[in-house]
Amino acid sequence: EAGVAQSPRYKIIEKRQSVAFWCNPISGHATLYWYQQILGQGPKLLIQFQNNGVVDDSQLPKDRFSAERLKGVDSTLKIQPAKLEDSAVYLCASSPPQDPGTQYFGPGTRLLVL
Amino acid sequence: GQNIDQPTEMTATEGAIVQINCTYQTSGFNGLFWYQQHAGEAPTFLSYNVLDGLEEKGRFSSFLSRSKGYSYLLLKELQMKDSASYLCAVRDTGGFKTIFGAGTRLFVKA
């Protein structure tokens, strides 16, 4: 079974530029999560989708971050414009319907904002 | 408020036993998870507790006391490859939102 796929793996941009990350969850997983993990901290949930609907986006900085999961499968997370403090690893995870609490993580996208 | 506390770092010797503690205060509770995260890699699932007691899985065991808001992860027969961060995470009720602690970095020395 293929795992959660993410791209790109690394990205370096300058502040005020925009960036987009892509995630393809495990086939059949209805729940998809985007996390931000700053160095030395635990993952912080940015947004949670159930199929193509948003379940929780309370910690998403909506003035600069946006995410979509239009067909209920893959998802994109965008930052526009980026700030220095957005430098982090962006993790995508998914959960199967029969075990919605257990999350399977992708390899992450490491973002550096200069 | 939501709060999960775990020690920042621990050091243990190869072959020994180590216990990593986690205390939590969350508005809802629908299970506690432990994840392992090697440096530069994504977290991987280790264990899940929703009822009080001890769950054993090979060299790893996890304990939960809901009344005390407390859990621990026990690692036996430590190996060098166990050097990693161990994340305690609590699942909220309702939409399955999961809150992660900052993680405990475990260093296993020879």
Image: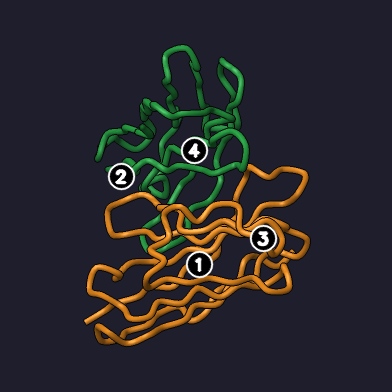
Chain A shade in the render: orange
Q: Which residue is mark 1?
A: A107
In the shown orientation, is residue B96 left or right of residue B11? right
Same chain under badges 3 and 2? The reply is no
Numbered disc 4: what chain? B
Q: Residue at x 21, y 82 (%)?
A: A114
* Element under disc 1: loop
Q: Residue at x 47, y 12 (%)?
A: B67
Instruction: Please state which of residues B96 and B81 is positioned toward the viewer in this rendering.
Output: B96
Q: Quadrant of the N terminus of chain B?
A: top left
- Of tags 2 and 4, which is closer to the observer? 4
The residues bearing labels 1 and 4 have C-alpha atoms spaced at a distance of 18 Å
Q: Which residue is mark 4?
A: B34
Same chain under badges 1 and 2? The reply is no
Label 3 neighbour load within 10 Å: few <14, some 14-19, many 20+: some
Q: Please give the label number shown on residue A53.
A: 3
Q: Which residue is mark 2?
A: B105
State which tag comes first along the sequence, 1 or 3: 3
Q: Amino acid at mark 4?
A: Trp
Q: Amino acid at mark 2?
A: Arg
- Among the chains pictured, the one given green colouring is B
- Tell me which corner region of the image, top left, top right, bottom left or bottom right, holds residue B48: top right
The residues bearing labels 4 and 3 have C-alpha atoms spaced at a distance of 27 Å
* Element under disc 3: strand
- Of tags 1 and 2, which is closer to the observer? 1
Tell me the colour scheme of the image: by chain
Q: Residue at x 43, y 25 (%)?
A: B72
Numbered disc 1: what chain? A
